[in-house]
Amino acid sequence: MSDDRIRPTRIRVTRLQEAQIEALMEIERACSAMYHEIGFDAAEVPVRTYADISHLPRYHNVYVAEADHEVAGYVAWRDESPGVAYIEELSVHPNYQRFGVGSKLLQTVEEDALKAGLADIVAKKFEKASWAGLFYANHGFVLLDENATGHAAGWLEERSGGRPLTRPGEVVIWKALRAQ
């Protein structure tokens, strides 16, 4: 990432459009490369294909962020029982990280989730991905464990069913959207 990057003057979030899929594939390649640089292999952090991305809207709400008219990032999330928003993916091209693009995408998810009456947001992240940990921590996310409350705890119980919910080195994080 170059230090001479220029902060975008406008970040706009819209629903995924077919014309944006190629740009999202480039974001996938660039973000996966960040993981590969810290020791993950392609099997652990695969790059989504055109078909993978184009099928996301079947089961997810997919939003794309444009920074000064350039596709800069995207988020895919869905409503899961018992009343949580599950973030499947939140990726921002490295050239646009730390400029508020991810925050704008997360804000869009939070607004949608609140309108839908959801109580919590959950996501998975790799522990070794320090940038993801800092991003989510700065937005109020904490580790989802047996001490969690409300809907997030119910989600964890429903999803795990006594078997591992994450891969080695991966954790589940959560944030309350409203008082339980």
Image: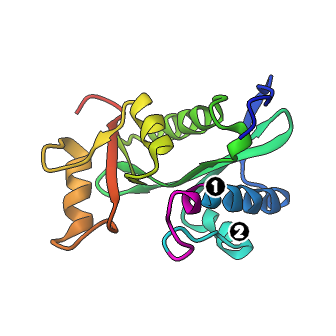
Viewer-nearest residue: 116 or 168: 168
| Residue 5 point in image, percent of width and height | 79, 31
Q: Which mark is residue 31?
A: 1
Viewer-nearest residue: 142 or 5: 5
Q: Is residue 7 left or right of residue 153?
A: right
**Which residue is rendered at x = 21% and y = 54% of the image?**
154
* Figure label count: 2
Splitting the image into 4 quarters, where does residue 10 fall?
A: top right
If you read the primary sequence from the N terminus, does the residue marked by circle 1 or circle 2 appear first? 1
Residue type, numbered disc 1: Cys
Q: Which residue is mark 2?
A: 54
| Residue 82 point in image, percent of width and height | 28, 54
Viewer-nearest residue: 71 or 63: 71
Region in magenta: 34-43
**Which residue is rendered at x = 39% and y = 33% of the image?**
137
Q: Is residue 65 above or below residue 47?
A: above
Splitting the image into 4 quarters, where does residue 2 fall?
A: top right
Residue 65 visible within the image:
no
| Residue 156 point in image, percent of width and height | 24, 57
Q: Is 39 one of the magenta-colored residues?
A: yes
Colouring style: rainbow
Q: Nearer the viewer, mark 1 or mark 2?
A: 1
Q: Is residue 4 left or right of residue 55?
A: right
Disc 2 crowd rating (10 Å Cα; few below 14, some 14-19, many 20+) is: some
